[in-house]
Image (tube, helix red, strand yellow):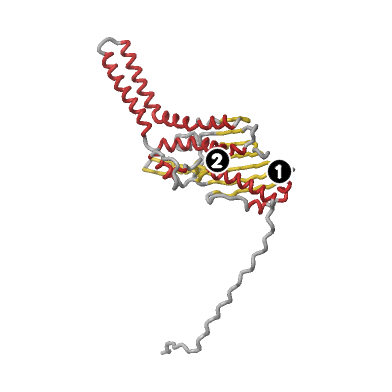
Amino acid sequence: MPLHELHQAPVDQVLRLLDTFPRRALRAVRWDAGRWVTLGVSGLILMCGVLCLVYPEPVPQIAGFMAFWMGCGLAMFRFSLRFSREDPLVEINERASRPELVAVLLRRLQRDLAADGGVTLKLRSRPIDRGPGSRFSPAGMGKSTAWTLVDPWLTLETRLADGAYLRLRIVEKRRCQSRVKLSRPNATRIRLKYRDVLHVDVRLRVKARRHPELATLTEAEARRCVRLPDSVTFRRLRVSADQLRLQIQVRQPWCARIPRSISSRPERKLAVAEAAFWRARADPLDASRMLTGLLLSLYQMLHVARFPQPPQPPPAPKAVPAPLPKPERSTRKRRGRKAV
């Protein structure tokens, strides 16, 4: 999986690079869908052309007739890939989700970046392969029944307009378990179970002389500034005199950005296939909103450190209700069965 690296590049150059990934993903999916058919039919058409040049009549007529109809069939097949089932759309979204997430985040931060500053980016656009055909299949993992794959696919560093230095790192860890199941006598099936966890680490380094109150900020006060979605797990928060560091875990499937067109107030109309695709996947977490919320939480910590809230009075003790009186015991004798 290739790793794209840019060191102190302008934001416009980084955005132009990220905008090319959806077109690359579309081209790769279409090529993967019909490359073997295209290669096979193209080889037959080339062989028919050779027969037309080498052999005398009537072989050239037959070979030309076959080459013409095979070319028409190949053109129809390549054209039908544009209107195929939803699976290519899913694969395109998986391949382009990482670059799209970085592009959306940079566009939101573009006004807050330093005028003469650049962006240092390390991005691995393609996710980890899965399935029996991948190189991470049980055949490539030896005899172990469970293993963990670590993919540090994003490192983003830049300087903001207020002098703070932002560093964002995202690591995906995939836990894979294989189980051998007997499908029929003398036949086995290998079932793979995947579990993906996304580890997000956000650091904001500031100048201690500009924020002298940050050293007095307690972890409990900083923790109250963090706003996380319900599906995100809080891991760690570190506060020092010149740095804020926040780490979280995401176990839910995520997408780069949920289009506004599937909301109650659409701004533009989506295609039928694209609208059905997003409606079926409206449950995943919007990763761009989550990362934006993390950055706002860090700046909320700086605000609380500079303007601490006055101590609140302890809550008034709740009135304890009086216990209910016990019911009086009846003095009436119970009638029992007489002994015989």
Where residue 233 appears, as percent x and y from the top left, is 56, 49
Q: Quadrant of the C terminus?
A: bottom left
In the rendered image, the vertical position of residue 83 relative to residue 220, given as above or below: above
Residue 95 numbered tag = none
Q: Residue at x 66, y 49 (%)?
A: 303
- Measured in 3D between alpha carbons, the distance from the residue under mark 2 to the one under mark 1, in whole angstroms, is 28 Å
Q: Is residue 62 left or right of residue 187?
A: left
Where residue 189 appears, as percent x and y from the top left, is 41, 41
Q: Is residue 82 visible?
A: yes
Few, some or many residues within 10 Å of mark 2 (<14, 14–19, 20+): many
Whichever of callouts 2 and 1 sits on the residue coming sooner in the sequence is 2
**How many badges with numbers are in the image?**
2
Residue 242 numbered tag = 1
Few, some or many residues within 10 Å of mark 1 (<14, 14–19, 20+): some
Q: Residue at x 40, y 31 (%)?
A: 33
Q: Is residue 246 left or right of residue 44?
A: right
Q: Is residue 150 visible?
A: no
Where residue 185 appears, as percent x and y from the top left, is 37, 42
> Disc 1 marks which amino acid?
Asp
In the rendered image, the vertical position of residue 162 relative to residue 20, given as above or below: below
Where residue 31 appears, as percent x and y from the top left, is 42, 28
Report the residue marked by disc 2.
Answer: 172
Element at label 1: loop
In the rendered image, the vertical position of residue 42 relative to residue 113, given as above or below: above
Q: Residue at x 72, y 51 (%)?
A: 216
> Disc 2 marks which amino acid?
Glu
Q: Is residue 299 left or right of residue 76?
A: right
**Is label 2 or label 1 in front?**
1
Element at label 2: strand
The front one of 55 and 112 is: 112
